[in-house]
Amino acid sequence: PTLIDHAKSQINKFDNKGVCQLHQWGLWCQERVSDKVFPSSISSQCAELFVLQDVSSSSFQKDVARVLNEMGITFKEEVNLESGYSIDILLTFNDEIIALEVDGPSHYLKRSKRKNGSTKLKQRQICNVDKVKLISVPYWEWNKATANSKTVDMKNKEFFLRSLLEEKSIRNIEVAA
């Protein structure tokens, strides 16, 4: 039997993590093969569990949100996209809908500036399945941009975010290509 047949017949034996991984694999098939592999009943079951995963806002994310608010940019936090992924911040900038992912140290391989596999997968699938432009805010760039002043003031943070949004918007980069 194929993986699809096995998943169909044994779906109730998968733990939550396994069902979430089936959902991600289904998204991968949509992304790469442009095809849905599971019947809608299984897809729905996988998606429901995937959406229920715990999400929480870090102090870093709250800081970025506070700065966006001070800049007068309207946004929503922890938005579930059609794929089931939760995005840290969803905003409109220069008439474009942009997903902003606030990437702290847990999104990177240890002692490196290379994203870990789960972060790469999530960000790639958001771009390719949800068709949403995604911009990553790496923690070390945020720290560097805000550490140049003895007092870490709001203006430095605003300048950093505006520069990041304008640069990515102008270059039309989808970070997770």
Image (cartoon, rainbow, N blue to C red):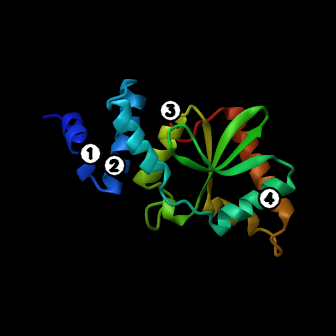
Question: What's the residue type where badge 3 is placed?
Answer: Asn
Please give the label number shown on residue 128. Answer: 3
Between the residue at mark 1 and the residue at mark 4, the CA separation in whole angstroms equals 44 Å
Between the residue at mark 3 and the residue at mark 2, the CA separation in whole angstroms equals 21 Å
Determine whether label 3 and label 1 are within 8 Å by CB: no
Question: What's the residue type where badge 1 is placed?
Answer: Ile
Q: Earlier in the sequence, mark 3 or mark 1?
A: 1
Q: Secondary structure at mark 1?
A: helix
Q: Which residue is mark 1?
A: 11
| Mark 4 nearby-residue class (10 Å; few <14, some 14–19, many ≥20) | some
Q: Earlier in the sequence, mark 1 or mark 4?
A: 1
Q: Residue furthest left?
A: 1
Q: Earlier in the sequence, mark 4 or mark 3?
A: 4
Between the residue at mark 3 and the residue at mark 1, the CA separation in whole angstroms equals 26 Å
Determine whether label 1 and label 2 are within 8 Å by CB: yes
Determine whether label 2 and label 4 are within 8 Å by CB: no
Mark in front: 1 vs 4: 1
Mark in front: 3 vs 2: 2
Q: Which residue is mark 2?
A: 19
Where does the image place residue 150, in percent across and percent down from the top left?
Answer: 82, 75
Closest to the observer, 96 or 151: 96
Between the residue at mark 1 and the residue at mark 2, the CA separation in whole angstroms equals 8 Å
